[in-house]
Amino acid sequence: MGILEKQVALITGAASGIGLATAQRFAREGATIAGLDIATADETEWSGVRNTAPASILLQANVLDEASVQAAVTTVLERFGGRIDVLVNSAGVSSFGAAHELPTAEWDRVLGINLRGSFLVTKYVVPAMLARRRGSIVHIASIEGLEGMSQQLAYGVSKGGVVQMTRNMAVDYARDGIRVNCVCPGVIETPLTAPLLRDFKAIGDLVVEQHLLGRFGQPEEVAAAILFLASDEASFITGHALVVDGGYTAGRRYGA
């Protein structure tokens, strides 16, 4: 029996990357998955979820659009008897540019998807959790929400906001039986970071060097941390930002 047996998990960004890896892992742990994504999933990859948890669904929704989010959450609740036990907010985008280079529209897009989107999905999921006085929410933040990185203003601010949003939500809902945590990954091999390996390899090599374990992480490694926080194995943990970064934030080594 898996540690999420008979639970319903709503996962945004479930078509690829960390969201897809989380959906696959949660399904193996007994959960039924309601995935939300603006994109459609590769059928071969999503079939791994569906074959393991046949009742699982993947809906198209745009986390920038409040009506789209509300409609998707309503569909999930109707499909699964008003239950959402776990929410994982994994939908996200990256961006590049310092303040004087960054178009205002790009700032709005990144904060809209990464921060406002996580807020909106939570806003419409929480009432069902409150009704049952039980739930676990895991946001995906980043190490860039904990420390600065060049050319990453919008992304870093959005993820810093997610870390603080996690704390505030934990305070608001703890006495209602709802835990709220986040994970802060280092650089993970996903479609989001593919340009570092493909188009900007020199920069990618420098970033790899800053991870003490000497490599980028894999989505499955982040999914394992999300699973822990989402499950009752973490029943006394709320308001926490769990770093999953191969040692990136532990310090620097200089070969001395």
Image: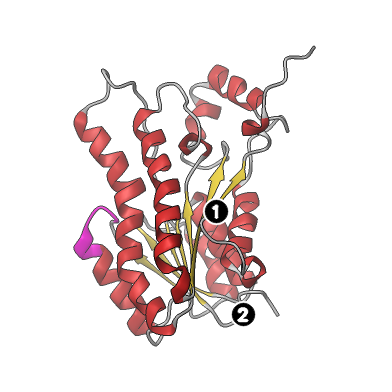
Secondary element at tag 2: loop
**Residues packed near mark 2 inside 10 Å, few (<14), some (14 to 19) or many (20 plus):** some
Residue 112 can be seen in this image: yes
Q: Which quadrant would the C terminus be assigned to in this image?
A: top right
Left/right of residue 101 with respect to residue 13 in the rendered view:
left
Secondary element at tag 1: loop
For discs 2 and 1, the disc positioned in front in the rendered view: 1
Q: Who is closer to the viewer here, 63 or 191?
A: 63
67 falls in the magenta region: yes
Residue 9 can be seen in this image: no
Decide: marks 2, 1 in contact (CB < 8 A)? no
User: Residue 67 placed where, x, y %?
Assistant: 19, 64
Q: Residue at x 58, y 71 (%)?
A: 27
Q: Quadrant of residue 225?
A: bottom right
Q: Residue at x 37, y 27 (%)?
A: 96
Q: Amino acid at mark 1?
A: His
Q: Residue furthest right?
A: 256
User: Residue 251 placed where, x, y %?
Assistant: 67, 27
Q: Which quadrant would the N terminus be assigned to in this image?
A: bottom right
Instruction: Name the residue carrying label 1.
Output: 240
Q: Which residues are magenta?
A: 63-68
Instruction: Name the residue carrying label 2.
Output: 5
Quick one: label 2 or label 1, which is nearer the N terminus? 2
